[in-house]
Amino acid sequence: MFINKLIATFFLLVSCAIEAGTIQGKVVGVADGDSLTVLDNNKTQHKIRLQGIDAPEKAQAFGQKSKQSLHQLVHNKQVTVEFQKKDKYGRTVGKVLINGNDICLEQIKLGMAWYYKQYESEQPKEDRIAYQQAELAARGQALGIWKDQNAIPPWEFRKQTRN
């Protein structure tokens, strides 16, 4: 049993290492507050899901404002995406940077996204701390989604919509 777990862990680490990398390109589309499209120098489009955050759904309160916020931050700009995996929809899940500035963190600071704690184990410790502190600060200042004291997290909204 131990050997099987060890082998499974090895293959998981190898698959993550193979998947890890960076994408550089221009943001050509913003789907919502946590998803965008990057066009690289080879003219290949990459669908990106911002790592560590979850923004309101389009049909949810603040959904359009969150999308507009991300659009203002990144549209037509050169970005670097640091990634380690793809999600179940085939999107690359990554940290989006403009001149070293973490756009995922900016969305949280602006009150346009939740820190997505469900996936915190996929982030470096310093990002987890920064994202948690940014959410607390945005909540304390009642920015964006935090103007609504009963804001429903997107993962709960999606669950309610499915049921």
Image (spheres, rainbow, N blue to C red):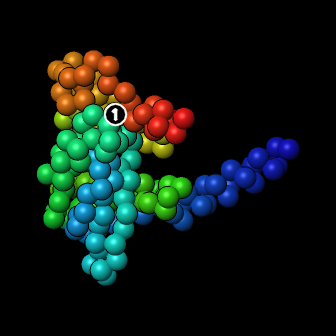
Task: Work out which residue is located at the far right of the displayed protein and give it.
Answer: 1
Judge left or right: residue 4 versus residue 108: right
Visible in this render: residue 137?
Answer: no
Whole-percent x, y for residue 16 in the image = 55, 57
Q: Quadrant of the N terminus?
A: top right
Q: Quadrant of residue 18?
A: bottom right
Instruction: Provide residue 156's location: percent of width, then percent of height.
Output: 45, 31
For disc 1, the marked residue is 114
State the SS at label 1.
strand
Residue shown at 34% from the left, 72% from the top: 45
Q: Could you tell me which quadrant the C terminus lies in?
A: top right
Q: What residue is drawn where x is 19% and y is 41%?
A: 65
Q: Nearer the viewer, residue 125 or 93?
A: 93
Q: Is residue 52 among what the camera can see?
A: yes
Closest to the observer, 130 or 144: 144
Identify the residue at image location x=34%, y=77%.
44
The amino acid at mark 1 is Trp
Provide residue 55's location: percent of width, then percent of height: 33, 40
Residue depicted at x 67% and y 58%: 11
Q: Seen from this angle, which residue lies furthest bottom?
A: 42
Q: Is residue 30 left or right of residue 49?
A: left
Residue nearest the observer in this picture, 130 or 39: 39
Query: Within 10 Å of the Cα at label 1, are there few (<14), some (14-19), or many (20+) other Cα atoms?
Result: many
| Location of residue 59 in the rendering, given as x and y in whole percent from the top left corner | 32, 42
Question: Count of labels shown?
Answer: 1
- Asked if 66 appears above or below 37 in the picture, the reply is above
Up the image or down, 72 lies above or below 135; here it is: below
Q: Quadrant of residue 79?
A: bottom left
